[in-house]
Amino acid sequence: MTKKIFISFCLIWLAVWPMPMSHPQAAPYFHDVGTTHRAKNEIYYLAEGGIVLGSVSGYFYPSKHVTRAEAAAIIGRTLNFDGKQRDTRFKDVGKGNFASGYIQEAAERNIISGYKDGTFRPNQLVTRGEMALLINRAYSLGGTTRSTAVQQLKIKGIAEGKADGTFGEDEPIIRADFAVFVARAINPQYRVNGGELTPIGQAVVNASSLNVRRGPSMSYSAVSLLYKGQSVDILHIVGNWAYIRASDLEGFVSRSYLSAKGASQPDAGDALSNYVKTQTIIIDPGHGGNDPGATANGLVEKNINLNVALKVKSLFEGTGFNIALTREKDVFIPLSERVSFAKEKGGNVFVSIHTNAGGGTGTETYYYSAAATNPYVEQSKKLAQCIQKRLVAAWDAVDRGTKRGNLHVLRENSMPAALVELGFIDRKEDAQKLGSSYWQEQAAKAIYLGILDYYASETGLNFQPLYDRVQ
């Protein structure tokens, strides 16, 4: 049975912050970015999308200077780069560098470059002039030199000069200013003059329904829906996302579900394949090592949790989804490290697997319901409901429902997260299934299908090819 562990400090990484002139502002979530901070809106906007991160103690450090590695990571996240750590072309950026994947892809796309000696100098500070060039290259704004890049940022309402009338091209840029410039670059609603844009093209929605989101990723909340055949003006492009206008509505939509007017529609299978490659699923087998969890009827919870988790991983292999387990053997992993692992992997969904105890029977699934720490309340609830429904059907189990739970791996996470209690280890009828390889496989299939149900509901994509793998 999962332990209800309460931690005295909050691990705060991401926060929802409303768009200008939309909803009332929420309380700040970084200790050093309060309601009066000049960059609060932009910082929290980027944090909602996982583009900027805070420290483990909940600080953003807005006055800290930005390094070249950090700049590559921030820009890369806006453009939906994979970010997976890997070898690079630079002799001073190894696979172990947190930003290695972002640095390599940014270099491949000529957004950022190294030096003649073959180094990248990841810890070197970025100047304001370099920042202007990076933003121009990343979002195709047109500036090719520092001076023309700065000029483009000013023209488009992305940047202003300093109080002394200069831009300070040679001065190191701080995190607050970098966040402001990036937020304005990707979302015109944050620009100084409203960022009036001229359409660069027109398109037609080719999905049955399409979410319009606040930012260029699935991490951002949906603000409206478009429907198949509806025409939109494309105002600018951020990676795989288009910032569009339809009547009086503006926001981001995935480019996979837009067709140029008169163009043939892309194959639905291609759209699914392209989408799942952007998604990382974290499976968390509860307990482990010197923490056995609950024990009864000759069974040990940690072993059941791991067996089911490994079966879930096996089901997702070959689907295109990225899948990662917090542990793949019998080792102890602290709760905080499980959460950190999920964030470091860029998780989009987190599912923790546990086994219950206490004399009851049946299956129940938990989600955290306070947005002050994990802002994905509605998504977490939906994820929990999808998994719960599948498990109850697969095991013909007593439905104990979807419940709110103040559990560390749910509360401190920064993505849709659910924790499932498969059954009661101290109940003979439940234990017979918990200890059975066949029923463990059925539980794994239910979790797999429940996650697909969640994604199908969120995206409107046809996941039938992935359903067919197990049905």
Image: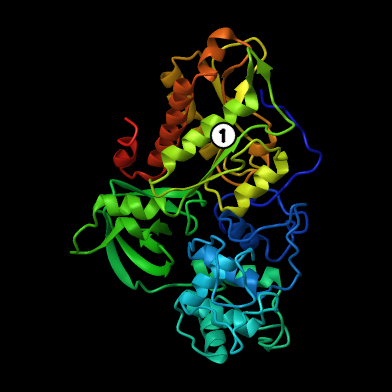
Q: Is residue 293 visible?
A: yes
Is 47 on the left or on the right of 210, as rendered? Answer: right
Q: Amino acid at mark 1?
A: Ala
| Element at label 1 | strand
Q: Establish if 464 lies above or below 33.
A: above
Q: Which residue is mark 1?
A: 418
At a point 58% along the width and 71% down the height, the residue shown is 72
Q: Position of residue 289 (x, y in %)?
A: 71, 34
Q: Residue at x 62, y 69 (%)?
A: 94
User: Given the current orientation, which residue lies at the most extreme right position?
Assistant: 8
Q: How is the rendered protein coloured?
A: rainbow
Apparent side of residue 110 relative to residue 167 in the rendered image (left or right): left
Quadrant assignment, res 421: top right
Q: Position of residue 45 (x, y in %)?
A: 59, 58
Does any portion of residue 18 appear in the rendered image? no
Foreground of the two, 467 or 11: 467
Nearest the eye: 144 or 35: 144
Residue at 78% in and 37% down: 7
Instruction: Pick the quarter of the image with the C terminus.
Output: top left
- 39 and 368: which one is in front? 368
Q: Position of residue 430 (x, y in %)?
A: 54, 13
Q: Could you tell me which residue is drawn at 70 percent across and 57 percent down?
A: 54
The image quarter containing residue 20 is bottom right
Measured along the vertical axis of the image, is residue 213 above or below residue 288? below
Query: Where's the N terminus, which quadrant?
Result: top right
